[in-house]
Image (tube, coloured by chain):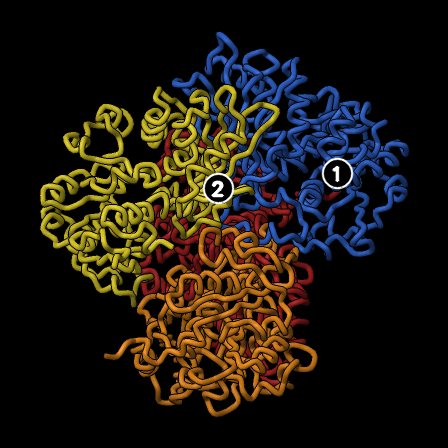
Chain colours: A red, B orange, C blue, D yellow
Amino acid sequence: MSSIYDKTDPALLKVAIVGASGYSGEELCALLDRHPSAEVRAVFSRQYAGKSLGEVMPRFTGLKIAELLFTEADPANVAECDAGVVFLALPHGVAAEYATTALRAGKVVIDLSADFRLRDPEVYADYYGGEHPASDLLKQAIYAIPELSREAIKSSPLIACAGCYPTSIQLPLIPLLKAGLLDPRGIVASSASGVSGAGKKAAVDYLYAECNENMRAYGLPRHRHLSEIEQQLSHAAGENVAITFIPHLAPMNRGIHSTIVATPAVGKSAADLKAALLAAYAGEPFVRIREQPPETKHVIGTNFCDIALYEEPRSGRVVILSVIDNLVKGAAGQAVQCFNIRAGLPETEGLI
Amino acid sequence: MSSIYDKTDPALLKVAIVGASGYSGEELCALLDRHPSAEVRAVFSRQYAGKSLGEVMPRFTGLKIAELLFTEADPANVAECDAGVVFLALPHGVAAEYATTALRAGKVVIDLSADFRLRDPEVYADYYGGEHPASDLLKQAIYAIPELSREAIKSSPLIACAGCYPTSIQLPLIPLLKAGLLDPRGIVASSASGVSGAGKKAAVDYLYAECNENMRAYGLPRHRHLSEIEQQLSHAAGENVAITFIPHLAPMNRGIHSTIVATPAVGKSAADLKAALLAAYAGEPFVRIREQPPETKHVIGTNFCDIALYEEPRSGRVVILSVIDNLVKGAAGQAVQCFNIRAGLPETEGLI
Amino acid sequence: MSSIYDKTDPALLKVAIVGASGYSGEELCALLDRHPSAEVRAVFSRQYAGKSLGEVMPRFTGLKIAELLFTEADPANVAECDAGVVFLALPHGVAAEYATTALRAGKVVIDLSADFRLRDPEVYADYYGGEHPASDLLKQAIYAIPELSREAIKSSPLIACAGCYPTSIQLPLIPLLKAGLLDPRGIVASSASGVSGAGKKAAVDYLYAECNENMRAYGLPRHRHLSEIEQQLSHAAGENVAITFIPHLAPMNRGIHSTIVATPAVGKSAADLKAALLAAYAGEPFVRIREQPPETKHVIGTNFCDIALYEEPRSGRVVILSVIDNLVKGAAGQAVQCFNIRAGLPETEGLI
Amino acid sequence: MSSIYDKTDPALLKVAIVGASGYSGEELCALLDRHPSAEVRAVFSRQYAGKSLGEVMPRFTGLKIAELLFTEADPANVAECDAGVVFLALPHGVAAEYATTALRAGKVVIDLSADFRLRDPEVYADYYGGEHPASDLLKQAIYAIPELSREAIKSSPLIACAGCYPTSIQLPLIPLLKAGLLDPRGIVASSASGVSGAGKKAAVDYLYAECNENMRAYGLPRHRHLSEIEQQLSHAAGENVAITFIPHLAPMNRGIHSTIVATPAVGKSAADLKAALLAAYAGEPFVRIREQPPETKHVIGTNFCDIALYEEPRSGRVVILSVIDNLVKGAAGQAVQCFNIRAGLPETEGLI
């Protein structure tokens, strides 16, 4: 008799988390703690080595994950731990070293940072500054949004989870570009993110009294996420795609709202595009095509991406609206989804 | 010896407010109460007739305006009051009747509603539904953003203050279109507004727990404000302009942030456009051209519009960011600025 | 071999929800949808009969509960449904009729309203106005905070879940009063609640722009919850207890923060009280005694109640801080906890 | 013919601000910029010396104050500037040195810090840590809440403005204690403050994503403000008063809400207390006695303190609610009010 776990690789169910104390790391802890199959064996931190996770993050007191003690986040320690999968919730530039040693130790790496998202180390240098810290690994890395690269994830040793803005923008655009339904020129994406997207670092710019009752654009003219968005859109379109991307900071903890304006390919209608989105995501558990404008509150705390597409008859363009929780589908949830695929588990396990 | 008040018309310093209890009306009360020259002689309300303004709006207790009693908001009463200027802070469709009788009584009308913003009653019918309530008055009405129509305001009996989104979008675009610096095709404006923009009406959609920690687009594909935006942009460009406009609701009380993407006219650079904006607003007290992305918190409670323009070298387009307080420069402040101009007062009086 | 489900009553695993579309009802849907053992067989609504739950509450699209169609919320329909347990997430005064017919049909009723919390129908009339709608049922009803009345819940046909403020106040106070450690006189409880506590009803008072950037007390001098708080504290103390209770509305969606000031009984110290709390809740999965001031964000989305107790040496009093999520431990989570107990399931199932 | 400026001391109309870039300093700049009589001659800063105020605080661009250049905040520089009044908006411990040199130079000092609020340097050492930085000046200092110490302010060289929480608590309590209407024992004050009260310092605890959707107590058991509250209440009562004070952080930018529970003196009723408050503040422009629970939104951006008093018949106690804007009546507004009094200006100038 077959089971939903027939394809599961038991060695991959033991996991470790490096960088658990940031916002994405915290969400990862929450998701993995209640995950039916995964077992968190170790958590690593430079700042909190020796303390229990519950002590550092009081919301977890009483959960099983709270009992874990943080181990010193040394790459060697990570390589030696008894987990088969290592999640890296670290800043860009820092993750690469951990990935290198963990891969060498035969572990699967699921990286939430930007270190392995770009195929071209020169683009990395251009957008992130400085030489790529481990460019030899780029060949092994899979750029991961499960709905768009599921097969590759199944056997990859190095899974580079897509960024938050990029996930919200690629999920609606890639099926349309792949099918030749969208003019790849002139795409505009105006996105707003909750403040947790800026990370848990002490900086005046992200103080409550600076962000509350305020809205502002930032990262102009070239936010770092532009590099991976254009890499992936270009790949899908089969030609160079340059988009106009304007990120904004909105006064909320979580959520990304992306508003995308684009033109259907010659001879194609908004109805064609909508039909293509419905077809592309018909069987997908985490993408919902909506009739009404999607709201970030409908996806907060979930791994869903909600998408709606509107015709604008006067200009012939379409308006596409897309929302995710930046810490779930835009980070930790997507990582767990990748984990489920890689470990041979049901893809929604621990996520719905 | 000359005074700053040499051109002041004393008859116009006595003012009345109809619809003081909404958010724009409340802001108007605050501004006019501390205005050095204006004297509020009467406030009108259907709901609160007989009550004092302070009783209805407790924040005003102790200010001189709080002592005023609301008069029944009958058009005849408004026509008979001893004010020379009547501010209408009423819903569209309702303002027209009051304007009609007030004008007949020789008063100057400063209307914050949409009733007299459109020159073509058919466009009104198309966007607002139903026949225009006083189409004969449209000829007398001046569409008013003082920076763009100052002269006309000086002698107009019927001043139709621009809407909030339209103000934030026209202030940066109109000088550029007038000067032929901008391609009028393909303009995209993605705007976010605080929830006070939805007015003070009991509706589940605007409850705190529905709007907080949430962001969503609305009014697609044709928000009502599109009609006046396109009317005015077309006028400036000398040709029909159709833009893509996507309004959003953001979790804040006040503020509009507009993100506009457009293409310079052939042969023009972003630097040309920026120079033109700097020149256009060099002497303007309420428009600030910024080097950094403007933030709504810098204009909240003020009559400023802050604007920044960025080149996007890869696409050849420009990104224009524009912020206002929807209740001040987007409503009550703009109305007071119009009042100052109309009454021959210094334009910034009571506003800085 | 024994299982954790040995004591489970299978007939009680089929459940129905009446009033699913309010905030507590929505939270109940979310919790029961992912509950491993419960099966939601029916949802009832007057307003939405015939529509699917996913249509009415878009956040649920894609979950199994979303497919359910709302049935007309007629007490007869509720009595006839094939569920063994009926959750009532209805306003006070409305729940009683549904409880009556459901009980008559042999179902277990878990009521989130105030209808069966008070033993004395005259107190009900005094606080809620009007005669009690089903005073004959009061004898059967169990006032339910599982940590304080677990045994009675196991066999009760009518479980009256405690209110949100009362839960946050009783959990710290009742063990202390029962043990005679606290002077029952002079207790002050100042509580702040998120706006979801006001329910999902269209009212100007709860608009975003009215509640954001605002804090205010309400319900003075006698909030309705005072009645059940004093009933239960008096029962625990063995004498009449009258407290001073001041509820406030705070600008957040969820969470209750209660700050309680009280005096240790003669000869007792703050250390005695803290030790008693630690002992009382040592084995409890949902109550955490803290060393640091508890924060509502640590309990949001969870069924935890976090409590801390501070000595105030100068006055000899103690300050007790207690936080819950008003929609979880204060409503839907507590109801599910009661359900688990009543159905013979592990108490934390679906809640951790 | 007499004028409202007959008593004005022209030498005191030139003012300087030290520490303009914090939240209180910024509010002070806003108030003094639009003050009809004051002229800001200099602004001092360590961090921003040489930059213009408008550059550092973009919200001020276009106002006259924006043109001022920050001078190096050296006490000698402050002593030499040509202002008659120096406002110190500095952290405690830092203000004292500036006060010393400014006083020596013959200037009037209006200090917003805690340095000169306590009469007893040992209490300062106990609450603030370390020896008092200028204990010889304490004799000259006036603890200033204008409604409670107006006469002393008129001639004082060193005006120590009360803290934010203390202002909200003393305004209702002091007249009652002075009149012997309140039992000085057993007073409880539970207060909530907006996050700007924590100042503009980079710290994880005050990040948006840490404070939003959160409420917590802090500073237990002895918040620093307790020292000045008890000093002043004791003085008013003529006996030692020890209160229980619990401050909380609420998710809003501005505003303090204090909820005070106290017992009328023997033989006194809530009505007596309310009458006394009405009498005490009958002629005061900035204190409003309310019939409804006061809301922080009614005082935000104003110098008002709104107070309501409720009888609680069951316990015989009274509940007093008091709200202010922590940055205005709790800091900068109160300082300007003191300035007006000290300079012989109408007390409300620039504040209403």
Residue B101 is left or right of residue C47, and the answer is left
Q: Disc 1 marks which residue?
A: C92
Q: Measured from the top left, where is residue A289 in percent x and y?
A: 65, 63
Q: Secondary structure at mark 2?
A: strand
> Please, what secondary structure does the residue beneath circle 1 have?
loop
- Please tell me which residue lies in front, D157 or B1: B1
- Could you tell me residue B61's position as x and y percent? 48, 51
Residue at the top extreme, as displayed: C267
Q: Chain of mark 2?
A: D
Comparing C210 with A116, the one in front is: C210
Look at the numbered discs 2 and 1 and tell me whether their residues touch, using CB distance below 8 Å: no
Q: Residues within 10 Å of mark 2 (few under 14, many from 20)?
A: many
Residue D289: numbered disc = 2
Q: CA distance from mark 2 to mark 1?
A: 34 Å
Name the image quarter holding the C terminus of chain D.
bottom left
Q: Nearer the viewer, residue D57 or C10?
A: D57
- Tell me what residue is drawn at x 90 percent, y 34 percent: C105
Give amino acid for label 2: Ile
